[in-house]
Amino acid sequence: MAHILITSGPTREYLDPVRYLTNASSGRMGAALAQAALERGHQVTLVSGPVQITYPPQAQVVRVVTTEEMLQACQELFPRCDGLIGAAAPCDYRTRRVSPEKIQKTGQPLLLELVETPDVVATLGQQKGDRWMVGFALETDDQRFRALTKMEQKSCDLMVLNGPEAMQADTNSVEVLDPGGRTLARLQGTKLHVARGLLRIIQQRLIGPQ
Ligand code: C5P
């Protein structure tokens, strides 16, 4: 039995008390991965941004809002886990300064200065030790090349490549790549079907027989 950490859903970066930047992510892939991991008898901890869906009750769920909070929660939990699946879509930018009051309209363009948020998977990759990590790459162009580059930059042992049609959908179509650039599988169907296929590969290649 492995203890698997799964990041899931979007994060939010507030501009003021009511407005925020975010990513289009429902958390459904994270929920499906949690379900598939639990079916195999693994222990699951989810670190999730704000989502509407419900996660499997047997999974421990840690709720966060911002990317920095997601990173902090994962840094605390990861040392106690055997591996991580990064299925979240953390918001990559935040405003340099969050306005404490609602920004008032002036009739003029509003200029926002955005700075990058930390990359959760890449940061954890620097302290992974003998833990394994699986990343997701949602790309519109140069999909394979970008996925392989991200796998290396983020110290991932496998990368799951999917297209933008996966967002907010119940189904998914993915390619699972190894660090050598080989396609280990093409999985297509409901997110639960894809998650079960991915967990089978993770079990074979990264966790091993129980
Ligand atoms: O957004 P990007 O294509 O770089 O995402 C690739 C992988 O990195 C995904 O597994 C995603 O969960 C993760 N990621 C992250 N923190 C970010 C951006 C992406 O953990 N700030």
Image (cartoon, grey):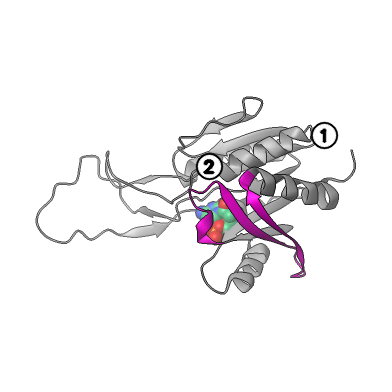
Question: Does label 2 or label 1 sit earlier along the sequence?
Answer: 1
Q: Position of residue 150 (x, y in %)?
A: 62, 65
Nearest the camera: 8 or 127? Answer: 8
Number of numbered labels in the structure image = 2
* The magenta segment: 163-191
Query: At label 1, which amino acid type do we have?
Result: Met
Q: Does any atom of ligand 1 lie closer than 8 Å to the CB of label 1?
A: no
What's the residue at 45%, 45% (across, down)?
Answer: 11
Q: Quadrant of residue 147?
A: bottom right
Residue closest to the far left: 107
Badge 2 marks a residue whose secondary structure is loop
Task: Report the side of 205 relative to 150 (left or right).
Answer: right
Q: Characterize the local packing of mark 1: few (<14), some (14-19) or many (20 or more) Cα atoms within 10 angstroms.
A: some
Which mark is drawn over residue 27?
Answer: 2
Quarter that holds the N terminus: top right
Mark 1 = which residue?
1
Where is residue 49 shown, x and y percent of the image?
48, 39
